Image (tube, grey):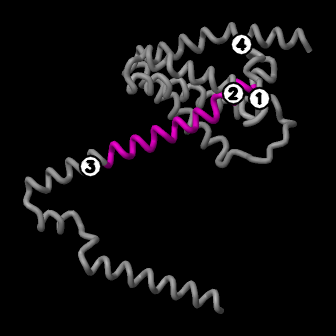
């Protein structure tokens, strides 16, 4: 009962605060704001604040993406190297920080090369996003392949709405990739050529790893 009273009291104080803010004019609808401000000033205000807001959202999204790639991509190289599918030096773990330091350095160097090659952030993003979505689609296709070829595998998590949901995702991915090939052929073909060029390297390491085992 005491906890319930505290929650009700907090709820009541929150409602009072919101009501006070609304009554004081802090929360206004666009039509009310337009009524208070002259048209030129309103346009200038929307232009300035809108640009700042969009730039802030892009910056937040960019830093979030950088964090994801900084944490995940080097560990993919590390896992491949540990399984014998990439250069073994990339499996090195820093003794103090316990991070794949060599893989992180390679990822950083590759990012610099890509940025210098493409020249603009927009071109780089288009190239990277296209390549990502190709692998996203292949991952979804893998669900159907493993359901048929590896029926004995334990599946603690099952895809919700199978097979409809994965099919929808594969369709959207296909349309996205096809659109990129039409709208941005330079970036799309650069990604496809790079992926095709990596296949001989993958099979080389895979064969060498098989010979070792």
**Does 212 appear above or below 4?**
above
Q: Which residue is at 47% across, 13% downward? A: 189
Residue with the mark numbered 3 = 50
Q: Which residue is mark 2?
A: 101
Mark 2 lies on a secondary structure that is helix
Q: Secondary structure at mark 1?
A: loop
Magenta span main SS: helix
Residue 92 place in picture, x, y as percent: 77, 24
Name the residue tied to disc 1.
Answer: 93
Total number of numbered discs in the rendering:
4
Q: Is the Cβ of the residue at disc 3 closer than 8 Å to that at disc 2? A: no
* Chain-order first, disc 3 or disc 2: 3
Question: Is 105 situated left or right of 42 in this image?
Answer: right
Question: Which corner quadrant holds the C terminus?
Answer: top right
Residue 128 vertical placement versus 7 (above, below): above
Disc 1 residue crowd, few under 14, some 14–19, many 20+, Cα 10 Å: some
Magenta stretch holds residue 66: yes
- The mark lying in front, picked from 4 and 1, is 1
> Where residue 126 is drawn, which disc sits there?
none
Q: Earlier in the sequence, mark 2 or mark 1?
A: 1
Check whether the beta carbons of the residues at disc 4 and disc 1 lie within 8 A of each other. Answer: no
What are the residue bounds of the magenta stretch?
Answer: 53-79
Q: Quadrant of residue 201?
A: top right
Q: CA distance from mark 4 to mark 1?
A: 22 Å
Q: Secondary structure at mark 3?
A: helix
Residue 68 image point, x, y percent: 58, 37
Q: Residue furthest right?
A: 213
Res. 202 mark: 4
Quadrant of image for the N terminus: bottom right
């Amino acid at each position: 009962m005491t906890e319930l009273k505290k929650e009700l009291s907090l709820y009541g104080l929150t409602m009072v605060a919101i009501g006070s803010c609304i009554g004081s004019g802090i929360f206004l609808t666009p039509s009310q704001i337009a009524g208070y401000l002259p048209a030129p000033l309103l346009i200038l205000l929307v232009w300035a604040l809108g640009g700042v807001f969009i730039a802030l959202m892009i910056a937040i999204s960019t830093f979030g993406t950088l964090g994801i790639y900084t944490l995940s991509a080097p560990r993919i190289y590390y896992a491949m190297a540990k399984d014998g599918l990439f250069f073994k030096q990339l499996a090195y773990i820093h003794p103090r920080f316990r991070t794949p330091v060599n893989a992180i350095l390679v990822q950083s160097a590759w990012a610099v090369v890509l940025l210098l090659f493409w020249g603009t952030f927009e071109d780089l993003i288009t190239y990277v996003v296209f390549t990502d979505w190709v692998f996203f689609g292949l991952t979804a296709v893998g669900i159907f392949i493993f359901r048929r070829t590896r029926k004995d595998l334990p599946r603690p998590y099952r895809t919700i709405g199978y097979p409809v949901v994965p099919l929808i995702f594969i369709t959207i991915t296909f349309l996205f990739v096809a659109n990129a090939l039409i709208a941005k052929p330079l970036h799309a073909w650069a990604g496809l050529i790079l992926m095709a060029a990596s296949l001989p390297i993958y099979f080389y390491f895979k064969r060498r790893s098989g010979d070792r085992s």
